[in-house]
Image: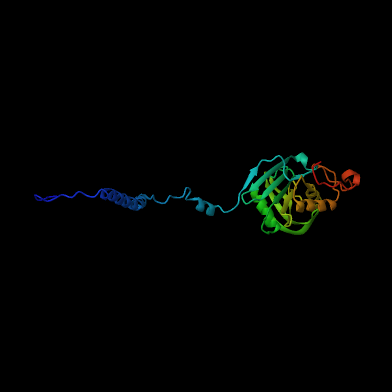
Amino acid sequence: MRTTVGEVVRLPDRRTGPALLALGAFAVMAGLPVVLLWNLAAQRPAPAEPIRPSLVAEEAADPQPVWRPVTARHGGFDVDAPRWRPLGQEVTMFRRSDGLAREVFRFGSAEDTRRHAALVVDRGEMAPATAVADLGAVVSDLGLSAAVTANPIPLATKFGAMRTADMTLESEEGSKACLGFALRENEAGIRITGWVCSGGPEIVSRQEASCFVDRLFTVGVRDAAIAGLFARAELSRHPCPAATATTAANPLVSERGGRPAPLRLNRL
């Protein structure tokens, strides 16, 4: 600053400096949030892509629930079939992705020339279907090749009348004639399906099929509706011939010397 001779220079008041410093600090603090927001907006990353962009497409491509085998010490059911046990017994359990549970009991092989029988118990909510549709679905799930046609004659069992279907299973040396059966109890949330097959084209005995179904019983199922169903069924069960699956059935020979068999509510 230029001054003339004789002019007096006035220094700032002592309070002016601190006031200017305070004003500058206030300006910095007021502008700092604006600067930070500006930087964040400039550095905002692009939206992340989904980890599995094809997940929706996969679900749409495979909407059907899938059965998977499971390992368990025991299931909720069993089949006490001494007439069929010499053919070999196989028990497998499955769970489906929609919550259904399945137990499969197979005696003998569906592919050789011997006799064969199977019982399948499904638990859970299932859409209504005919006996042919139920049996066809089970046959397909088990990987078998079979023709299934409706049969109007019901099968008398301890559970009451079961819907039936004529079945033909393809074996190594031809085909096996089978009688299929299906039962639905919606209140108990259970479906029972299965079949009894001869070793060839011979017609299957309905009495033999009824006795096979009647051999199904529960093993510690903690469901009042299912327990009630099987308790009522046991009260309606009739004695069956005691012949084995490899000998001819003798209707004059029944369980325990002709006396009705005891109630079967659990494993012997």
- The percent position of residue 69, horizontal first and vertical second, equals 64, 43
- Is residue 111 in view from this perspective? no
Residue in front for this viewpoint, 174 or 212: 212
- Is residue 132 in view from this perspective? yes
Residue in front for this viewpoint, 122 or 18: 18
> How many labels sit on residues?
0
Residue visible at 73% across and 50% down in the picture: 195
Q: In the rendered view, would you say 40 is above or below 91?
A: below
> Furthest residue to the left?
5
Residue visible at 72% across and 52% down in the picture: 193
- The percent position of residue 95, horizontal first and vertical second, equals 65, 47
Colour style of the rendered protein structure: rainbow
Left or right: 62 as drawn, with respect to 267: left
Q: Quadrant of the C terminus?
A: top right
Residue in front for this viewpoint, 169 or 117: 117
Left or right: 215 as drawn, with respect to 62: right
Residue in front for this viewpoint, 251 or 161: 161
- The percent position of residue 255, horizontal first and vertical second, equals 87, 45
